[in-house]
Image (cartoon, rainbow, N blue to C red):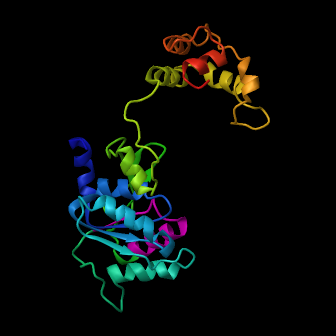
Amino acid sequence: MNQEIEKRLEPYRTDHLILLVGSNPLPNYVAAKLLARARTKIHLLCTRPTAGIAERIAVALRSDQADIDIRDTVEESRPETVRAALTQLVGNEEQAGSIPESDTIGLHYTGGTKAMAANAYHFLLSKRPKTVCSYLDAQQLDLVIDGSHPDGPDKIIPVGDAVQMSLEAVADLHNIQFETKPQRTPKLLGLCVALQREHESNSVWPAWRRENLLRKDRQGEPRSSTELRGIVFPRDQFPGLCAAVAKLGAKDDTFIEWARACGNA
């Protein structure tokens, strides 16, 4: 993580970070890497069905975070269970919580369900008004610090690729097992680069692809192999793409010849 992002994140890092666990473990892992200091205690609130996901998050984080607490007493359809779990942490009028009043608290609510997020958000701010609340904007690749923090309004921090993960680490987080070891050397790299450029700079390509390569009755599905055999890629419209396939040994710009050159026919 570069120093500029570290500097912008530091004011919002807290002594305790509460993460709401849903079906996707990745947002919580990313949030923890962004918002937890080495001494931050992480609290994972989850339901019993998602306890395995919480454990995988904990395993992935333990190389950096020694103190991780998993609480699997939340029931998604019962708001009082969210409040009860948080009461154990921050207390209420009748009982003290395990987190001292002097410690700072962060709540990151991208990972949980909407019901969990809403209940946790309102309860924590009612008990600890200085709680730093945050979520990830997956569309813009930003971390948003909610305006409820003492410095309001919202703070938007572009994080982009600040958190780096290997393909194997992402797979482990999702409990995915590879049948064979992933290839680290890209296949058909030149073709992939040419396709990316067409998507980014040539507005004709998406429309041409949709009209010629995909079925009209089932949007998004490719046409049958018989139909695709007769397709010819127009070199005048896609010179970069055609040149990339020619380097693979294609003798002409027909679909069947491109498939052969790419090793798929």
Q: Report the residue at 41% width, 40% height from top.
A: 182
For the C terminus, give its image quadrant. top right
* Rendered position, 159 above or below 251: below
Could you tell me residue 151's position as x and y percent? 31, 58
Answer with left or right where residue 159 lies relative to residue 217. Answer: left
Is 106 contained in the magenta span? yes
Please report the bounds of the magenta region as a residue range. Answer: 105-125
Is 74 contained in the magenta span? no
Instruction: Kindly indicate the quadrant of the structure image that contains residue 253.
Output: top right
Could you tell me residue 44's position as x and y percent? 38, 69
Q: Report the residue at 51% width, 72% height from top.
A: 49
Q: Is residue 151 visible?
A: no
Instruction: Kindly indicate the quadrant of the structure image that contains residue 222.
Output: top right
Q: Report the residue at 33% width, 90% height from top.
A: 95
Answer with left or right where residue 66 lies relative to residue 107. Answer: left
Could you tell me residue 5's position as x and y percent? 27, 44
Could you tell me residue 108's position as x and y percent? 39, 62
Q: Is residue 32 visible?
A: yes
- All told, the count of numbered labels is 0
* Rendered position, 27 above or below 202: below
* Rendered position, 159 above or below 93: above
Answer with left or right where residue 5 lies relative to residue 245. Answer: left
For the N terminus, give its image quadrant. top left
Q: Report the residue at 73% width, 30% height from top.
A: 223
